[in-house]
Image (cartoon, grey):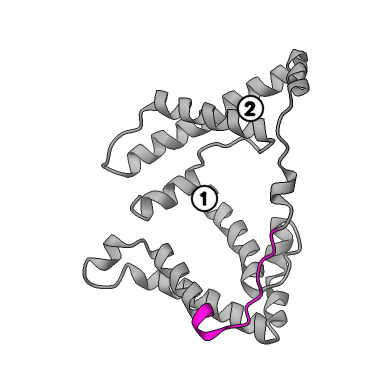
Amino acid sequence: GMLAGIGLVLIGSQLYAMVGVGAPGNGLDNLAGLPELFTRITGAAAISSTAIGVGTIIVLILWKRLPGRLPQMLPGPLVAVGLATAAVAVFDLPVAPIKVQGLIDSLRLTGLDDFGLLADVGLLGVILAFTLIASAESLFSAAAVDRMHDGPRTRYNKELIAQGTGNTICGLVGALPMTAVIVRSAANVQAGA
């Protein structure tokens, strides 16, 4: 139920990107605006973007049904995105690009004066809370993934050390904390990773 709900929210927001228009904002507004979204598929860029998106979804669905070993060797999402990219490049399709701006500018390296903030007891409590929540979520995800496949089992100490190292680097460059999430992990298992 929870994963299906998350999936609906993600699909609801990504359909707007597929058509090449901005999403209304939150999950409920995105889903409520879907009927109107289909009336906004006008113009060459929106039609091309929608056709490429629908074609990508069709490749994703049909890829595992192909006979032979090729579907086992290549993940369907990789093939779908590769074919979509090739189609846009070869046929010079007017698709609506997604503009991502300001990501690098938002990173701010930590200076020596920032380490003085660690003396604040309130901040230490927030750090401890983030550490415990992110670590627990990652370990729960790892345990769930271990039950989804027959491959090598998670080494939990190594998992926590890697996450701690990554989050230390995230903190030093001003990025958000990272953690394992079951939705992404389940997608990786289904893709054969």
Asked if residue 115 is positioned above or below residue 6 in the image, the reply reads above
Distance between mark 1 and mark 2 Cα atoms: 23 Å
In which image quadrant can residue 61 be found? bottom left
Q: Residue at x 52, y 54 (%)?
A: 4
Whether residue 97 appears in magenta in the rendering, the answer is yes
Asked if residue 181 is positioned above or below residue 60 in the image, the reply reads above
Q: Amino acid at mark 2?
A: Phe
In the structure shown, which secondary structural element does the residue marked by tag 2 occupy?
Answer: helix
In this picture, residue 132 sits left or right of residue 80: right
In which image quadrant can residue 8 be found? bottom right
Whether residue 139 appears in magenta in the rendering, the answer is no
Q: Which numbered disc, 1 or 2, marks the residue that appears first in the sequence?
A: 1
Q: Which residue is mark 2?
A: 130
Q: Position of residue 71 (x, y in %)?
A: 29, 66
Q: Which residues are magenta?
A: 88-100
Query: Disc number at residue 96?
Result: none
Q: Nearer the viewer, residue 32 or 118?
A: 118
Q: Nearer the viewer, residue 74 or 35?
A: 74
Q: Nearer the viewer, residue 42 or 45?
A: 45
In this picture, residue 147 sits left or right of residue 167: left
Q: Position of residue 97 (x, y in %)?
A: 65, 71
Query: Disc number at residue 3?
Result: 1
